[in-house]
Image (cartoon, grey):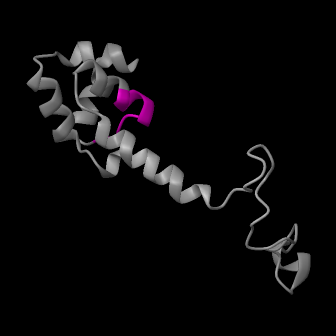
């Protein structure tokens, strides 16, 4: 999700804005320095938790991200059972256990021998 919001150039700008080294950033993210440098070059991207740690380390305002996550939580809460947070969702596309197996039956999934 976060990699849609930020790029490697953004990571680099955040790091440089607070005068941090790639080594320091890598240590905070729990990765090797070369991995962090690849992220800045656009090869791969940190996980969400790593990105949040990096942003907090650089004293970046994450309120917009938190607000976005709250909006997502609201959006997806309509799909849970209202009376019990711990029960599986009963609002499913299909109540049948094997709904993906079409009218062709199990034969459609078997391979020829």
Q: Magenta region: which residues?
A: 43-52
**Residue 113 pos. (x, y %):** 88, 71
Tell me, yes or no, if residue 63 can be seen here.
Answer: yes
Asked whether 91 falls inside the magenta stretch, the response is: no
Q: Which residue is at a point 18% across and 39% down the rendered structure image?
A: 10
On screen, residue 60 above or below 24: below
On screen, residue 112 above or below 9: below
Q: Which residue is at a point 45% across and 46% down the rendered structure image?
A: 70
Asked whether 45 falls inside the magenta stretch, the response is: yes
| In the image: residue 77, left or right of residue 18 | right
On screen, residue 100 above or below 52: below
Tell me, yes or no, if residue 44 can be seen here.
Answer: no
**Residue 2 pos. (x, y %):** 36, 45
| In the image: residue 24, left or right of residue 80 | left
**Residue 12 pos. (x, y %):** 16, 32
**Residue 109 pos. (x, y %):** 82, 73
- Foreground pick, 48 / 60: 60
């Amino acid at each position: 999700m976060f990699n849609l919001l930020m790029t490697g150039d953004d990571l680099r700008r955040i790091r440089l804005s607070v005068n941090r080294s790639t080594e320091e950033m890598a240590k905070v993210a729990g990765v090797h320095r070369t991995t962090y440098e690849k992220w800045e070059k656009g090869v791969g991207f940190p996980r969400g938790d790593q990105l949040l740690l990096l942003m907090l380390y650089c004293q970046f305002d994450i309120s917009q991200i938190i607000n976005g996550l709250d909006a997502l939580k609201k959006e997806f809460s309509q799909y849970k059972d209202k009376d019990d947070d711990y029960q599986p969702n009963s609002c499913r596309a299909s109540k049948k256990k094997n709904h993906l197996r079409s009218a062709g039956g199990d034969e459609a999934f078997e391979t020829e021998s």
